[in-house]
Image: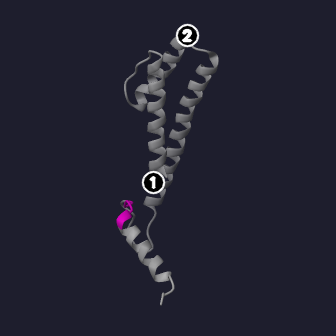
Amino acid sequence: MRQQLVKYRVAQSNNLRGLLTEYGEVMSMGRAALNEAFPVVIARLIDRLPAVLIDTLRDQWSGLTELDKRISEIERRLGQWMKRPLKFGGRVTAVAKPDMKRFKFLSESLRSSALPAQD
């Protein structure tokens, strides 16, 4: 879930940066650079672009802030979960990435074993 939100945030950030570039406003890569430059860029564009577009750009930027909050909340929850003691002792030290090849093999094996035998 977190990884998808991060990917979506990066895509939205790049989309917003690209759109602003079309209007002649170029800024550095990265979320911090966008946060720093966006208010200044919007102030310069207010006189050149329609209000509806300025509002849409602001909405897009505030959507990034909402994504930041959601990602931070997931990270906070994961941090709490990783600190809790396990039933068999110790603590969780890492969350492994799923092995999709193994998962596919296991799901195919389960599916084939659940099918009735054909004569």
Quadrant of residue 104 in the image?
bottom left
Placement of 71 over or under 16, stated as above or below: below
Q: Position of residue 68 (x, y in %)?
A: 50, 39
Q: Which residue is mark 1?
A: 79
Disc 1 residue type (three-letter): Gly
Tell me if 114 is positioned left or right of 54 in this view. left
Task: Look at the image and give the residue range highlighted in magenta.
Answer: 95-101
Residue that appears at 49% across and 28% down: 16
Q: Which residue is mark 2?
A: 48
Placement of 96 over or under 34, stated as above or below: below
Query: Magenta part mainly helix, strand or loop?
Result: loop
Q: How is the image coloured?
A: one colour
Secondary structure under tag 1 reads helix
- Name the residue furthest top: 47
Placement of 18 over or under 44, stated as above or below: below
Q: Is residue 97 magenta?
A: yes
Disc 2 residue type (three-letter): Arg
Q: Position of residue 32 (x, y in %)?
A: 42, 29
Residue that appears at 45% across and 26% down: 17
Q: Pointer 2: residues within 10 angstroms few (<14), some, or many (20+)?
A: few
Q: Position of residue 95 (x, y in %)?
A: 39, 60
- Name the residue furthest right: 52
Secondary structure under tag 2 reads loop
Q: Which mark is residue 20?
A: none
